[in-house]
Amino acid sequence: MPKLDFSQMNQIEAKVSFEDTSIAFSSRSDMELQKMYWMFAAVHQNWMVWVGTNAIKYSFQMGLPIKWAVKNTIFNHFCGGETIEDCKTTIQKLADFGIGTILDYSVEGEKTERGFDMTAQEIMRTIDKAATNPQNVPFSVFKVTGVAPFDLLAKVQSGDKLTASENETWQKAQKRVDMICQRAHERKVRLFIDAEETWIQKTIDNLAYTMMAKYNREQAIVYNTYQMYCVASLQNLKDAYHQATMHNHYLGVKMVRGAYMEKERARAAEMNYPDPIQPNKEATDNDFNDGLKFCVDNQQRIALCAGTHNEYSSYYLTVLMEKYNIAPNNPNFYFAQLYGMSDHISYNLANAGYNVAKYVPYGPVKAVLPYLFRRASENTSVAGQSGREFTLIKNEIKRRRQSKKS
Ligand SMILES: Cc1cc2nc3c(=O)[nH]c(=O)nc-3n(C[C@H](O)[C@H](O)[C@H](O)COP(=O)(O)OP(=O)(O)OC[C@H]3O[C@@H](n4cnc5c(N)ncnc54)[C@H](O)[C@@H]3O)c2cc1C
């Protein structure tokens, strides 16, 4: 199979452009767009995010009736609803534009065995939902820390001997992961295992590979996540591919850049070990794009989902697919973004015939607040995302005004 390098990029006509705001916001009414404008205008200001986040936290702590206001603003923008049933409208709205939904139960910070069991049951319900509507709900997803204690995952990774009761808890955690993957396998639903902090990630990787060996014999059902901001991830991906080849199973790959950079760097500095994160953004970008290429090069055994809001990487994958004659709708190649973000990428890719899905978080308003606060801070002007989102919204409002005049 021919190899492709970056220098060949501009010799290939890709079929997609992310410029078209009329496609990007085709699902939004004028009123919805105006509402988005005000919301992004607010999150664009760092001080507004800081004040807003603290005011919401305080109001919930004091039992003030703030739920309605949160629900009608950032919650509705970034989440599908409070329950799977609530997400029906969002699933259909995305499906109308050829975009799939990945139901993401976003309740964080469970610490009890009962809480882990309940989360596992909820994830099974998302799998059942996907099984009954595979066209519109093409994947399920879960975080291992939703079904197992964080500290225990870290202890397993450290190699320290577990106590008898820790060992019992660890056995139960592994059973939950197996139960979820088994359900996905029985119902033929592809399942992402999200990546988390590096000091628990090796434990998660090992669980994911055990599940793949068991359930990825006929096709990629279980997908592990590779955070390309880690120096080690590209090699880990290659090693996982060789293991999959040796043991004759498929490798499911969700590729992301990684969400915990500051936390990772701070911990490494505090505990005086080498920073696991790439030295700069360019190095992360290069490994992400090389990782995409590695997956395309080895497509006979790898199924890929590029989880990114990066225009270049999304475009690059379309170019690779074109170069290797991979049809845009090949089920082993997906693009994914978060609901409420980067619609210009999702809607334009879907419009050009590519497989696209959005993570649609859901859960009780109070329980998904940590998720919402992360999205709000990611969208401040310092982080840079909102600059782009805000400009696109303004452009579309302007375009609609002009087209009404003419
Ligand atoms: C569908 C989907 C699923 C996801 N699942 C996960 C998951 O399971 N686990 C997880 O951790 N994250 C996950 N993420 C979040 C993801 O890791 C990124 O944080 C986020 O998408 C931003 O990266 P980007 O590829 O969109 O592009 P960009 O906005 O181009 O890149 C921003 C990212 O680049 C990296 N970066 C920025 N500055 C530097 C620097 N100085 N040095 C090194 N690297 C730098 C960081 O990872 C940062 O988040 C997911 C995202 C999506 C869309």
Image (tube, rainbow, N blue to C red):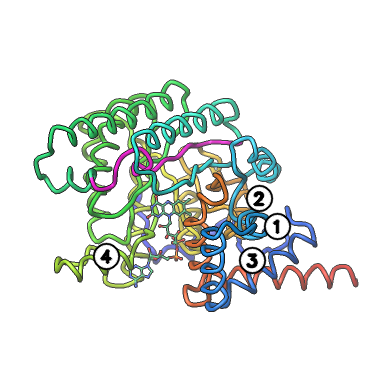
Q: Amino acid at mark 1?
A: Ile
Q: Nearer the viewer, residue 21 or 77?
A: 77
| Mark 2 or 3, nearer chain start | 3
Q: How many discs mark residues in the rendered view? A: 4
Q: Nearer the viewer, residue 347 or 263?
A: 263
Q: CA distance from mark 1 to mark 2?
A: 8 Å
* Quarter location, residue 144: top left
Q: Amino acid at mark 2?
A: Asn
Q: Nearer the viewer, residue 263 or 220?
A: 263
Residue where numbered disc 4 is placed: 277
Identified at 37% across, 24% down, the residue is 182
Q: Residues within 10 Å of mark 2 (few under 14, many from 20)?
A: some
Residue where numbered disc 1 is placed: 23
| Mark 1 or 2, nearer chain start | 1
Q: Residues within 10 Å of mark 1 (few under 14, many from 20)?
A: many
Dot 1 falls on a residue whose secondary structure is: helix
Dot 4 falls on a residue whose secondary structure is: loop
Specify the segment rendered in magenta.
136-151
- Quarter of the render that holds ligand 1: bottom left
Dot 2 falls on a residue whose secondary structure is: helix
